[in-house]
Image (spheres, grey):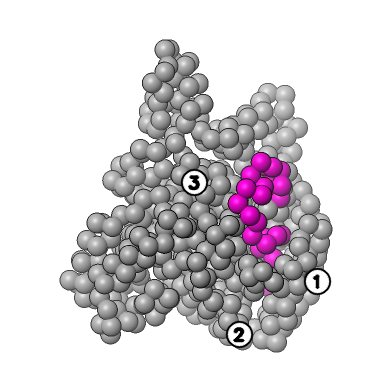
Amino acid sequence: MLHLSIKQTQEALRQKQFTATELTQAYLDRIAQTDEKLNAFVTVTADLALEQAKKADEKANFSGLLSGIPMNLKDVVCTDGIRTTASSKMLENFVPPYNAHLYDRLLDAGAILLGKTNTDEFTMGSSSENSYFGTSRNPWNLDYVPGGSSGGPAASVAGDQSIFSIGTDTGGSIRQPSSLCSIVGLKVTYGRVPRHGCIPYASSFDTGGPMTKTVEDAALVLQTIAGQSEKDATTVDTPVPDYSQFLKTDLTGMKLGLPKEYFGEGVEKEVVDTVMAGVEVLKQLGAEIVEVSLPLTKYAIPTYYLLVKSESSSNLSRYDGVKYGHASDQAKDLEEIYLKSRSEGFGDEVKRTIMIGTYALSAGYYDAFYLKAAKVRALMKREFETVFKTCDALITPTSPTLPFKIGEKADDPLSMYMSDILTTPINLAGICAMSVPAGFSQNGLPIGMQIIANQFEEGKLFHVGHAFEQATEWHKKRPIF
Ligand code: GLN
């Protein structure tokens, strides 16, 4: 029962093949048996999950979009009364007084919360090695990273510890770990899903979204969490379509672009070959394939890191040792409260963020760094708009490399930043993209294919992704660990 998709599980619940309580208990057992290896969970909410499952069984009505479906949330999604840490010592004991709006929407749809999953501290990273609670591991090979920052969510879904998870994506944090663990990960259009109650990294980039086993499941979860929210002024009143109507298997009439910059220098050959084999499948399904160019791609990494670290250094100023979060017991005066609480509470990458961001925003450097990067961002957005005048969606690799070994890039922030070269442009432009399983390397490590569409065109991602998935078997493979 732990291999089923959302749709299949709900079918089984309706036919009484098992109860929500049995299902939830099976997932909790699985977590207990496997999490020593995966380290995907920061907190397991067993009592709450069983209570929610009992209610679902009592109601015996599994018609809600997600009723009876056990899931987890990345540990930056605030949960009322349940510790939410952002995998930081700073928030090790932080218990939020309210729910993130997207969690409320999931609860309304009947989902069951198994726990909170691991991330790079404050979602800064691409491997989950920056977590205060230790690295999560890739179920396809435990010596390898599951990616990041949503490494816990990805490992937990790939390892059958949950049917789905909610991750966040600021520069690739849903898509890259999904690619590295062979699951489906959707980065939504900025403004499609409320960010209210999600601990921020960089507010003009952050998006919450589904990490699932199938494209259909991603559509179901998005259906639940999408839409304008009175609690988040950056959500948009664009209507939420019925996403199930996009789950087609024929791509006739679809024009798909291959941006040549995404297949060039720095992208491993096995990754390129696998994605190109995927493109052949798309062609056979009726899609027309064209080569396109996005020349500004080469500026994505510096532009992204300047802007994100600047926004983040400002966001992080709230952790002052006074209001909430870690407070040093060594401080003798106010200045020391700030200094020691922050020095003790934050890890290396967060400190790096504060230094880069504060520098870029400081008087005299603002115009040269922050403002310049903001202008490049606008140009990159325009470049995508132009390309989408000629094609429906773009196909690229998600990660330039195969999953890497734990420790391999840990001491080299720059090479870690390069992991995001193919995902950050999408966040800079505020558009949407999805990673789907596309194959495996010779040594059995997953490779993902990224589908990119214009803003609020998640439907096209589901269309292309579902057709591809139905024509391939990659999503059916299960890791043995
Ligand atoms: N690795 C990227 C960063 O550290 C992306 C992280 C994310 O999307 N949260 O900025």
Q: Find residue 463 and report its horizontal and vertical position in percent.
A: 58, 77
| Residue at 63 percent of width and 30 percent of height | 355
Query: Does the magenta run of residues contain 415?
Result: yes
Q: CA distance from mark 2 to mark 1?
A: 23 Å
Q: Find residue 162 and report its horizontal and vertical position in percent.
A: 40, 65
Q: Is residue 152 above or below residue 219?
A: above
Main secondary structure along the magenta-highlighted residues: loop
Q: CA distance from mark 1 to mark 3?
A: 42 Å
Kindly identify which residue carries mark 1.
291
Reading the chain from its start, which is encountered first: label 1 or label 3?
A: 3
Kindly identify which residue carries mark 3.
134
Q: Find residue 418 and report its horizontal and vertical position in percent.
A: 71, 50
Reading the chain from its start, which is encountered first: label 2 or label 3?
A: 3
| Residue at 44 percent of width and 71 percent of height | 220
Is the residue indicated by label 3 positioned so its CB lies within 8 Å of ligand 1? Answer: no
- Report the span colored magenta: 391-418
Residue 90 visible to the viewer: yes
* Kind of residue indicated by mark 2: Ala
Kindly identify which residue carries mark 2.
471
* Kind of residue indicated by mark 1: Glu
* Kind of residue indicated by mark 3: Gly
Q: Is residue 277 above or below residue 380?
A: below
Tell me if label 2 and label 1 are in contact, CB under 8 Å. Answer: no
